[in-house]
Image (tube, rainbow, N blue to C red):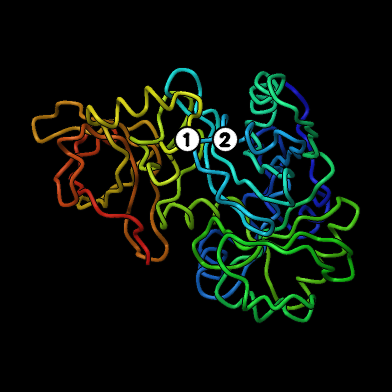
Amino acid sequence: MDKLKSTALTELHRTLGAKMVPFAGYEMPLQYKGLLDEHHAVRNNSGMFDVSHMGEFLVQGKDALGFLQKVTSNDVSKLSPGKIQYSCMPNAEHGIVDDLLVYCLDVNKYMLVVNASNIDKDWSWLQSYASNFDVQMENNSDSISLLAVQGPKVAELLQSLTEVNLGDMTYYTFQRAPFAGVEDVIISATGYTGAGGFEIYLPNEAAEQVWNAISALGVPPAGLAARDTLRLEKGFCLYGNDINDTTHPLEAGLGWITKFTKEFIQSDSLLVQKEEGLKRRLVGFGMIDRGIPRQHYPIVDKDDAIIGEVTSGTQSPSLNRAIGMGYVHIDHSKAGSEIFIQVRGKSLKAVVEKIPFVQ
């Protein structure tokens, strides 16, 4: 087994009493005081995640825009410096190489933020197309730390650490500015919890200084367990669960980041699938019968015929009931449709719901 990687804050997490687990090749904090405390803290106030395992690629050069237009599904030409875009990289088999964020740093200069488990795969995929364009790429994943400070009170709490007016920052924008005494930090407003907040990109050597400065303001740490329940309540996809190499963006509900006004990898065949109609779709559902849905549990109809599969599921701390997402045959994808989740041999009733589960 390969040795697990560490972030710049791994020893700090241990000192804080975090339960550490393997995740995407890294040793990461699963929880500190407990899932429920951390989930509610972020949803109602504030919490801080170390997500330094994420990957960061720099793409620049004369053809940077054209290159990203080819390899990503969203329309990168709509970006200007300071703006961010959610997108995905389709593969050659109608699946998704990865979902990612595209930061426009300057004209013909971009930062791609990719999933930790896909860093090597994404890099190889991008390199295989880069030779056709005048672009230069750098993989900065091992030198950048990333803190996600999330929650409705975060702008107010963090304001003393920066001259940027955090309350005025709009969704999917960023600014480069000093933060907590560290020069040229990227402060962005995207969020994977749906609770509001900011992401702080900074050099590894400054990570502990900034973490401690934020902690001193009363922001508690939160682990990957709470991050997963928070994102699922908002219906956000997790790569490896809800999207992967075999799911295409349209059936995953990502038509809004799939722009057919340009040509990209597999755009022609995806357009054909759109026009012919989808055969399955990713939906949210709430459990009626008592039971927790888990990834890969079969989804069946009233006659126990398999119509899909669960991709994510949990007991929602905010709603105090079990929720999940999964792919179902298109005939069963309408909100209000009755479906059943097979849990340990029993078919438990559920109903398709519109997402997000939590507004």
Q: Which mark is residue 356?
A: none
Instruction: State the image quarter where residue 168 is shown.
Output: bottom right
Q: Is residue 321 visible?
A: yes
Is the residue 269 above or below the residue 136 in the image? above
Residue in the picture at 72% in, 43% down: 108
Front residue (pair 3, 234): 234
Is the residue 31 above or below the residue 67 in the image? below
Instruction: State the image quarter where residue 32 is shown.
Output: bottom right
Front residue (pair 226, 290): 226
- Rendering coords of residue 211 (x, y %): 79, 64
Q: Give the left or right position of residue 219, taking residue 191 as reference.
A: right
- Rendering coords of residue 41 (x, y %): 56, 70
Is the residue 152 above or below the residue 264 in the image? below
Sequence-first tag of 2 and 1: 2
Residue designated by label 2: 69
Q: Give the left or right position of residue 352, taking residue 141 as reference.
A: left
- Rendering coords of residue 37 (x, y %): 55, 67
Quick one: quadrant of the N terminus?
top right
Amino acid at dot 2: Gln
Residue designated by label 1: 262
Amino acid at dot 1: Lys
SS of the residue under disc 2? helix
Residue in the picture at 73% in, 60% down: 200
Number of disc labels: 2
SS of the residue under disc 1? loop
Q: Give the left or right position of residue 322, taking residue 66 as reference.
A: left
Q: Are marks 2 and 1 in contact (CB under 8 Å)?
A: yes
